[in-house]
Amino acid sequence: MKDLSASLEQRKKSHQYRSRKILASPQGVDVVVDGKPCVSFCSNDYLGLANHPEVVKAMIHGAETYGVGSGASHLINGHSHAHHALEEELADFVGRPRALLFSTGYMANLGVISVLLEKGDAVFEDRLNHASLLDAGKLSGARLKRYSHADCNSLAENISSFSQKYPDRETMIVSDGVFSMDGDLAPVPEMVKVAKKSNAWLMIDDAHGLGVLGKNGGGTLEHYGVNYQQVPILMGTLGKAFGTFGAFVAGSEDLIETLIQFARPYIYTTALPPAIAEATRASLQLVMNEGWRREKLEKLIFRFREGVSQLDLNKQGIELLESQTPIQPLLIGDADKTVKISEALQEEGLLITPIRPPTVPNNTSRLRITFSALHEEHHVDRLLDALSGACRLVGH
């Protein structure tokens, strides 16, 4: 029998041990964590909708109308009017014929890749893809090929080599739209060209782009002006910019019907509570109609990046990675140092979770700073002041 205590102790020694903080308030900028008030800079609630009054009201109305639990999977009797309406509205939002709800983004990715590929096929994934995409590739039985981050030359070489050896096998290219730990964007237009040339499926997981990027919040694909014929498979999550929970896949009529018939994570999972679907319908309206939230985010991000450039943290071996999204990674490298800076910031009332291996590669531990439309300029300035002091303190 495996010695569990030894593996736990090893994780502690490598400064990779994780512990949960207890949140005693709604998501937002001002939160109470472990009994202490903090300003949060580590939530994915990018548009500040997780506790929006209209979203809360819609969820209450949904619970009063449909009850709490959905009672069954979608294909038994758990598919409510709320689910169906949300799917239609999401499809319209992303400009695709149909959308299909999943209980989580993890399950959506498992469902799509396992249905469209089988043993002998190949899936080509960016090295920095989310764990759910990598796991989906492994569990599909297909050959998992990882190409250099955001490098379409590497992708093209890999897929060309495979197709020459196995011309009759299916191929799929899969990437995050916005990379969750780096905040940068996938080179989608170049990926479209590679996919077209190689006759491969192209799937974008836009968990961190939807609602945030694009004039209308349509995400990475709207940002680039790419349509659904060019990227036939889009996965989006609802627990980030939308402020609720769950995920969806959007694409052609045939794609969605295929997933309904064959995707085991969809077929054999209890449907989302319909009240969550109702809450998401309300948040979707806010995403579409309140563009000021995206505009404010842009200003906050600019202010932060300008401020960090003046702190000159490079002298301490700390680098702010390039990102135009609310994900602003401060690369520190050493895991122990990253944890100590995070702890020093929390002492100042600022909550930023340290990100360490295995979530990120070795020697790339970081503070993953994220912004919300609920932040104000004074929050950014307070963060900059605290970062300066904490980094100097730990640096010595």
Image (cartoon, rainbow, N blue to C red):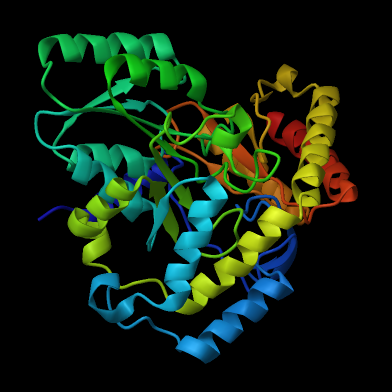
Q: Whole-percent x and y of residue 205?
A: 44, 40
Q: Whole-percent x and y of residue 75?
A: 24, 71
In the image: residue 231, left or right of residue 386: left
**391 or 76, which lies in front?**
76
Q: Can residue 187 be seen in this snapshot?
A: no
Q: Quadrant of residue 165?
A: top left
Q: Whole-percent x and y of residue 239?
A: 53, 59
Q: Quadrant of residue 300?
A: top right
Q: Going 42% across and 55% down the picture, which residue do you hit?
A: 248
Quadrant of the frame with the C terminus? top right
Q: Going 81% across and 45% down the picture, which residue do you hit?
A: 296
**185 or 377, which lies in front?**
185
In the image: residue 4, left or right of residue 165: right
Quadrant of the frame with the N terminus? bottom left
Q: Quadrant of residue 147?
A: top left
Task: Check the image and report above or below for 209 versus 175.
Answer: below
Q: Whole-percent x and y of residue 52?
A: 71, 69
Q: Going 39% across and 50% down the picture, which residue do you hit?
A: 249
